[in-house]
Image (tube, coloured by chain):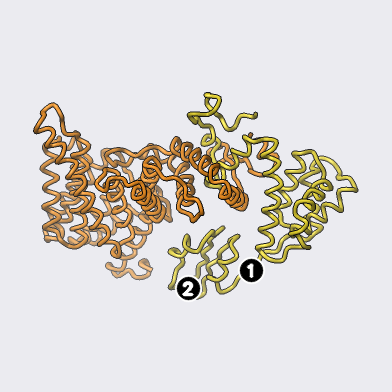
Amino acid sequence: MTPDLVKRSLVHRERDSNGDPVFTIHRALQHTLLVKLDEDPTRRVEIFNQVHTIVRQFLPETSPTQTPDEKLWPQLEKAVPHALRLCRIYMSPSQNRLPGSIQLARLFYDAGFHTWEQWNPTTKDGIIFLETAETILRDSNYDIEGKLYADIHSIMSMLLDQIGISQRTAVVTRRTKATAIRKKVLDLEIEKHRLDPAALVDPVTELLYYNAVNDEGRSCLQSNLFEEAGKAFELCYGKYREWGDEETIPFEYAKYYHNMSYVHMYQGNYAEALRLATLGVKITERKGRSGRYWWFKYDLACIELQSGNLPLALASHLEILEAREKICGPASEMTIESDYTVGAMYHHLGKLELAE
Amino acid sequence: MRWLLIFDNVEDWDSVKLYVPSVSRSNSVILMTSQVEDLKHWTTFHHQMKSLEIGVGADLLLKFVYSDTEPPESELEPARYLSELFGGLPLAMAHIGGFVSQKQGSLSKYRDQADRNFASSWRGKPSTVQEYERRLENVFDIALTELSNSRPKARQLIDVMAFLNPDSIPEALLITNLEGSSSGHPHTYTEDE
């Protein structure tokens, strides 16, 4: 079939940078095809459902614990653009609305999660995915306290965090909702376990709840409510100590040390802040010098600056900038953040030409 | 510092407006290319790309159809006619050439078919973007109708492609194992049928 399309010059076949065969199709032809399908609603729905199935098989599902998985990123890079097009078509105005489903909402949530978990987040696309998923859930009368809503609130708040101060109120609202849902689910399982000891509490349920508490703590930090933030992080730390130690659950401990370092920084306890931040970096480094490692290193460098050690902070930020350029690319939000920070550091040191 | 910022193939203003700098713009340029004419309202200067001259368009069309041989004399005038009718639009020339070549037909027959189907709506060379778009749709109509009649599964495949990212559709994406296919067997889109 594809040779038929290629010979008619309806599509073009070539090889991508990896040497894999790919097809391209002109947008004008796509527009014509969609207009024709608009005139045949039954066929339009049939094709849409086929594409949904195809994209679902191509796009990996997210981790139930909302943990980034770098091994999936090459596949995601290929799959997410197709999910985005499907999402835009779903939301585009039409006389005949395309059918939504929980599965479709889940697809768009997965795609939205993937846009966040990569170290070069495409925030706007992620927001489109998650808002569309929410619209579908609303139209499907999905339980307002259902898990997928909590998942969406959680990741949407991460994406809105990328935008900045203007979204802080929205972030807090969503994180509050996510925590409430997670708590309700956890409380139900605890109650079931109380009534029937054989019915164990799902560790994933517990993890997601404490992740939500941790996220609320981070929102407190953004509003300089460092005491409240500290309470949230300590609550999580208490649970981590029940679950394991730095060897068995390094991700959670690194997160705690990283977050608490900021609490101590706000309190002016720079020595303790530096100790905890360094610990967080060291634990994260055990899994390699990934984007997360450099994120934690960046925050350590910020604490170095706040503690008054400008030369050390500059050296750290220069190292981070070089790494981010390689890992995330020169146009990544993270790299640009480091560009700005290095400039700011030079300014602090009075080296204005370098700052410029 | 002077800079040049290029947005290529912009589809709508919303997709770029967040990235258009509002400061530090003196001695710098933002260049935007688009197939959407309305975007010119967001710019201070716009330039409409010219399509090919009639003769150049005709030559291109003949190359698509007669890549290995010398075109017959009888095809030269239809080539010029079609080139003028579609304003020398390279995309139209490519599709018409591909269609005629695949059908092992002739530009003369294509012209007759196009005139029969669309004579009432076509008048001379297109002069607006909307006219170019309408005529291009007509070219697609001819090709898609023929495809539906002769290769329905290929038609279904291209309908599927309408919903995918146009710039890179991996062949692997189209090798699918859809449940419920009428044959009950895995359906591989890239098999010839």
Residue kind at label 1, given as amino acid type: His
| Label 1 and label 2 in one chain | yes
Q: Tell me if A255 is positioned left or right of B10 in this view.
A: left
**Residue at the image point whose x is 53% and y is 41% from the top:** A47
> Callout 2: few (<14), some (14-19), or many (20+) C-alpha neighbours within 10 Å?
some
> Callout 1: few (<14), some (14-19), or many (20+) C-alpha neighbours within 10 Å?
few
Describe the element under mark 2 as helix, strand or loop: loop
Q: Tell me if A49 is positioned left or right of A138 in this view.
A: right
Residue A242 picture location, percent across and down: 11, 36
Residue kind at label 2, given as amino acid type: Arg
* Chain letter, disc 1 residue: B
* Chain letter, disc 2 residue: B
Quadrant of the frame with the N terminus of chain A: top right
**Residue at the image point whose x is 18% and y is 53% from the top:** A217
Residue A201 picture location, percent across and down: 16, 34
Q: Which sits in the foreground, A85 or A295?
A: A85
Residue A187 picture location, percent across and down: 14, 41
**Residue at the image point whose x is 34% and y is 47% from the top:** A137
Please indicate, yes or no, whether residue A289 appears anywhere in the rendered image.
Answer: yes
Q: Quadrant of residue A12?
A: top right
Q: In the rendering, what colour is chain B?
A: yellow
Which chain is displayed in orange in the rendered image? A
The circle on residue A238 is none
**Residue at the image point whose x is 78% and y is 63% from the top:** B124
Q: Which sits in the foreground, A284 or B104?
A: B104
Q: Quadrant of residue A264?
A: bottom left
Q: Label 2, on which residue?
A: B25
Image vertical order of residue A92 relative to residue B47, above or below? above
Query: Given this view, does label 1 or label 2 mark the residue nearer the observer?
Result: 1
Q: Label 1, on which residue?
A: B47
Q: Tell me if A168 is positioned left or right of A24 in this view.
A: left
